[in-house]
Image (cartoon, grey):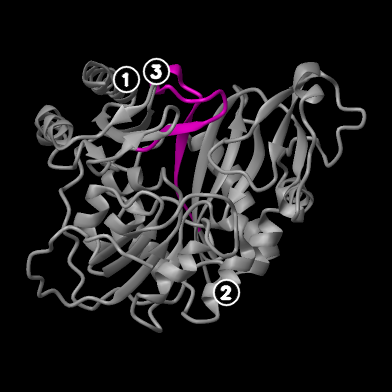
Amino acid sequence: MNRPNTAAKSPCHRTAGQLVILGASVRALADSASRAGWDVHAADLFCDLDLQAIAKVAVPVAHGTDDAATGYPWSLITAAEDFPPSTAWCYTGAIENHPDLIDAIARVRPLAGNPSDVVRRLRDPAELAAAASAAGLSFPETLFSPDGVPLDGTWLIKPLAGAGGRGIRRWTRAVADHTMPRATKANQLPIWQRYTTGTPLSASFCFSRGATRVLGVSRQLIGEPWCHAGPFAWCGAVALQTASGRTDTDPLLPSLERLGGVLAERFRPVGLVGVDLVTDAAASITVIEVNPRPTASMELFERSGAGSIAADHLAACGFATPSAMTLKQPLPLPASTWAKAVLFAAEPTPVSQSLIDCLARETSPWTHADGGWPALADIPRPGQTIASGAPVVTIFAAGTTDDALAILRDRVAHIDALLSARV
């Protein structure tokens, strides 16, 4: 398999362990691991410029169909074969949808994460519903057949092996008339789930040897038109926690701690785990799904001063952080909340070096204002054209809890206008 040249690296003399990170997009976890002292070998679908700068080696893998021979995610196996043998590996989204792949790679290198049997159980709606009930929380009514499901849009059809909200639709007559569920594997079948109204949140947990810690809670940005996101597409998050440790979700913490205890007892997960939730004005919680690996919103807590998410994950999985670990990152901004958004392409977007240079110039003042934390991430490689509806870039902003989202929206609008002017 031909490998593209990765970005040139300057000489590096730090003491570090070796770590392999695989997934659809691994930049956030790779960034955290690199800052914590690990030499990262990464493979994902994008191999963005900043991932190339972060990782010792970064490799893009083929898109295409879910084919065991050539397509993603099975192409990650071939990519990983070129990385140092016996090196620990961890995964990001949406590898939880492919427990057989987890097994295949875990047979040849140590896994820093949840094994396939834990993943299968955590992703099983019936098991998760029972766990939510044991914690005194709700779970949406869920069916595995459309028989008897109302066609008025109050229910959703969702892929059981979904990620990022892709493939979710309201169940209506028009959708039903054009839906013929077919699958070659059980986890590719859809489910029908009653729609839950309220505020979408993500709770970040760290599980280690029976201990459970709530790392933080973020508000999820779902289907935002200002990001050109699809109706149910995940397009960012706002961390509901400041660097001082104050959180705007204190009323939820007892329930979340109960949930974490139940998950720990029933499933024995390890490392960082994200739980998607919906809450209402009375602080009632409905559990939606569990993502049994580090999630995209967790880097916001690292920027807020909660420590290295990669170090937390690896230590919880039994992998010691390099002994000479020195966190190479800016200090957290006092009393600031962090937010991030994924901007999707409104139309096919060619990526040129001049565009990349322009983005760097435009966002440099933002990075300076945010204490040195990069305001832009997941920066695409020049020479490609990003398809309409595909992610272009990730944008960050920091501010008070009340204005972080407003600053983020202004920045997204600025970048969106810049992209539109250059298409």
Residue found 62% across the figure and 58% down from its top: 261
| Residue 398 position within the rendered picture, expressed as x and y whole percent measured from the top left | 25, 31
Q: Residue at the location (38% across, 83% down)?
A: 85
Q: Which mark is residue 226?
A: 3
Q: Is residue 389 left or right of residue 285?
A: left
* Mark 1 or 2, closer to the camera: 2
Upstream in the sequence, badge 3 or badge 1? 3
Query: Where residue 230 sits: x, y (%)?
Result: 52, 25
**Which label number is shown at residue 366?**
none
Query: Tag 3: residue type?
Result: Trp
Contact, mark 3 vs mark 1 (Cβ under 8 Å): yes
Q: In front of the other: label 3 or label 1?
A: 3
Which residues, given as a range, are shown in magenta? 213-241
Q: Which mark is residue 104?
A: 2
Any mark on residue 409, and which?
1
Alpha-carbon span between mark 3 and mark 1: 7 Å
Task: Relative to 86, say whether 205 is above or below.
Answer: above
Q: Which element is circle 3 on? A: helix
Q: Earlier in the sequence, mark 3 or mark 2?
A: 2
In this rendering, the count of numbered labels is: 3
Q: Horizontal and vertical percent for residue 244?
A: 28, 41
The outermost residue toward the front is 2
